[in-house]
Image: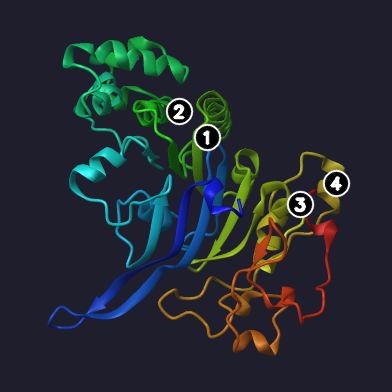
Amino acid sequence: MSEESDSLLSVKGLTKTFPLSRTIIGRSAQRVRAVDGVDLEVPGGLTVGVVGESGSGKSTLGRLITLLDRPDSGTITLGGTDITQARGKRLTALRTSLQVIFQDPLGSLDPTKSIGHAVAEPLFVHGRIRRGEMREAAGDLLARVGLDPVLTERYPEQLSGGQRQRVCIARSLALSPRMLVADEPTSALDLSTRSEILNLLLSLQEETGQAILLISHDFATVQHLAHRVAVMYLGRIVEEGPAQEVVGDPLHPYTQALASAVPVPDPVVQRTRRRILLNGEAPDPANPPSGCRFRNRCRHAMASCATTDPPLIALSATRKVACLLHEPSSPEPAREPAALPR
């Protein structure tokens, strides 16, 4: 992960702002930094989870990586090639390597088109099959995700939520992409269906060797699926590392609070754990606090946190954190292992 050459996707210094208000002549009067200087690496064949509260910028990051939105600055490299400014035919060709699974399966499917058309359309558009071959191709793809090929004749409203999400996964696999960006792929589903979809993604990754960028607000979902985790807060990554290390021994106070909310299946252990509650709501992203953006909600906040904006620093070959508690000159912060899942 530390070596750029090992990464299928590399993001450097990515930023994106959106206008909140405009002047009478249409100029932007106030802007919010949804993504603010993000660096991220996704190795081939592995899953990197991006987790954080609503409004942390994780979905915007996913849209930037897939070029559904354009970054204000920074670079996006896929397979060693800079794709940041890809447009036209180059962007169309790029879609064969990078596909998206959206949060709302019903909203991402055309209600006027059959399931067979929705699944096989990418193959037809990119010239992989003829129109007369779409039904057979769609049936094969549906079978890969555990659906009966007879569903090719149905329409989105005739399927359950879990079936629709499987259809969207089948469509994303049609072009055999090198990487999938899954934006909250299970948040609209019930608990049992979520487990089915997550296990499906795991089995498909083992079969195809695809990389996955998993975006979620649910720490438990990311823990189940991801090899590495990046924790976002107000547009920035505040901690990054192997999933089991970040979940088992979180370093940033924000990550500690998220991890403490993940239930443990052992009831005896669960009763001994203490939930870490954050103070208040997340600050206005258009007007973040000075210094550390998390300081107003942090139980370890120091005077220096109000003036120093901590960078994301490497503590080891695999762990990074943006917190003054972990600066070399700072004392080692007290750990509370009983409050955290193991």
CA gap between label 3 and label 2 equals: 31 Å
Which one is earlier in the sequence, the residue at label 3 or at label 2?
2
Q: Residue furthest left?
A: 25
Q: Position of residue 81 (x, y in %)?
A: 37, 49
Asked if residue 85 is positioned above or below residue 300 in the image, the reply reads above
* Amino acid at the residue labelled 4: Val
Secondary structure of residue under mark 1: loop
Using the image, tell me which numbered label, if any, was put on residue 162: 2
Look at mark 1 in the image and give the residue it sits on.
190
Distance from Cα at disc 2 to Cα at disc 1: 8 Å
- Residue 245: tell me if it is visible: yes
Residue under label 3: 248
Element at label 3:
helix
Instruction: Give the spatial CA distance, label 1 vs label 4.
Output: 26 Å
The amino acid sitting under disc 2 is Gly
Q: Is residue 217 visible?
A: no
Picture disc at residue 269: 4
Q: Residues within 10 Å of mark 1 (few under 14, many from 20)?
A: few
Q: Nearer the viewer, residue 189 or 212?
A: 212
* Circle on res. 109: none
Judge depth for marks 2 and 1 and give the one in front.
2
In front: 215, or 148? Answer: 215
Q: Quick one: label 4 or label 3, which is nearer the N terminus?
A: 3
Quick one: 119 or 264, which is closer to the camera? 119
Q: Residues within 10 Å of mark 4 (few under 14, many from 20)?
A: some
Q: Residues within 10 Å of mark 3 (few under 14, many from 20)?
A: some
